[in-house]
């Protein structure tokens, strides 16, 4: 009889321990994770669950690995989108500025923009042929030819005379190669030539 009572008492104690472990009052899961042997005993009793593999955790909770090439493409696309937006803003601002009448600081219409070539020719008008020739010595043939064709013949002749002979000969050949009435800048386009500035 004592043996039966002892067995019943043991079953009651074990049942109480099982209930406490099942309700996680006793940390059965933590104990099972520390010992693989304990895990084998507690798992069939539903007191512990096996720890998930690292790969499963990565798939379930962690974001997918990032591809560096995709990141670079995304960054380039974002930059292109920003550049397009800025270009559109600039285009609209330019169109608005172009459409608005130009007014100077005094409220009067602003002067038309200055033509750089005409400004250059006006400056040449104040200079001597030797000074202009020293400037032309460092300029490309196309620019010199264009300016010479825009000057009156007397001034152009003085400048050609002041240039070294080989450069004068080359410029003269280039002038002769131009179609009649054409300037170096308009010969290819067929546009009408500008009248020559009289200095």
Image (cartoon, grey):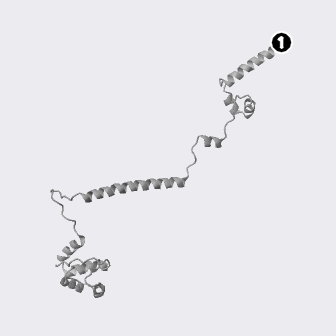
Residue at left offset 21%, top offset 85% = 157
In the rendered image, residue 59, in percent from the top left (x then y), is placed at 61, 43
Task: Report the label total.
Answer: 1
Answer with the quarter of the image where residue 108 lies: bottom left
Which residue is under mark 1?
A: 2
Q: Which quadrant of the rendered structure holds the N terminus?
A: top right
Percent across and percent down for residue 19 are 69, 21
Q: Report the front residue among 34 and 197.
A: 197
For the point 71% across and 19% down, the residue is: 16
Q: Quadrant of the C terminus?
A: bottom left
Q: Residue at x 61, y 41 (%)?
A: 60
Image-based side of 138 in relation to 83, left or right: left
On the question of residue 19 being in view, the answer is: yes
Residue 134 locus on image (x, y percent): 25, 79
Can residue 138 be seen from the camera position used here? Answer: no
Q: Nearer the viewer, residue 189 or 153?
A: 189
Depth check: give the residue in front, 143 or 180.
Answer: 180
Kindly indicate the quadrant of the structure image that contains residue 162.
Answer: bottom left
Q: Residues within 10 Å of mark 1 (few under 14, many from 20)?
A: few
- Give the secondary structure at mark 1: helix
Q: Is residue 165 left or right of residue 107?
A: right
Drawn side of residue 44 relative to residue 121, left or right: right
Indicate whether 90 appears above or below 60. Answer: below
Figure quadrant of residue 146? bottom left
Q: Is residue 177 above or below residue 64?
A: below
Q: Residue 177 location, x and y as percent?
A: 31, 86
As displayed, is residue 4 above or below residue 43?
above
């Amino acid at each position: 009889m004592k043996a039966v009572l002892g067995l019943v008492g043991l079953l009651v104690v074990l049942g109480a321990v099982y209930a406490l472990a099942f309700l996680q009052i006793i940390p059965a899961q933590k104990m099972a994770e520390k010992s693989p042997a304990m895990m084998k005993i507690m798992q069939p009793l539903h007191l512990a669950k096996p720890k998930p593999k690292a790969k499963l955790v990565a798939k379930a909770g962690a974001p997918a690995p990032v591809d560096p090439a995709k990141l670079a493409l995304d960054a380039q696309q974002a930059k292109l989108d920003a550049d397009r937006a800025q270009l559109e803003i600039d285009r609209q601002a330019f169109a608005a500025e172009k459409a608005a009448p130009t007014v100077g600081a005094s409220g009067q219409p602003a002067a038309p923009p200055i033509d750089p070539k005409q400004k250059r020719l006006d400056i040449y008008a104040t200079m001597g042929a030797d000074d202009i020739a020293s400037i032309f010595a460092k300029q490309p043939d196309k620019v010199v030819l264009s300016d010479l064709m825009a000057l009156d013949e007397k001034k152009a002749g003085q400048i050609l005379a002041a240039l070294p002979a080989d450069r004068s000969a080359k410029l003269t050949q280039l002038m002769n190669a131009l179609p009649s009435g054409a300037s170096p800048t308009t010969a290819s386009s067929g546009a009408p030539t500008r009248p020559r500035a009289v200095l």
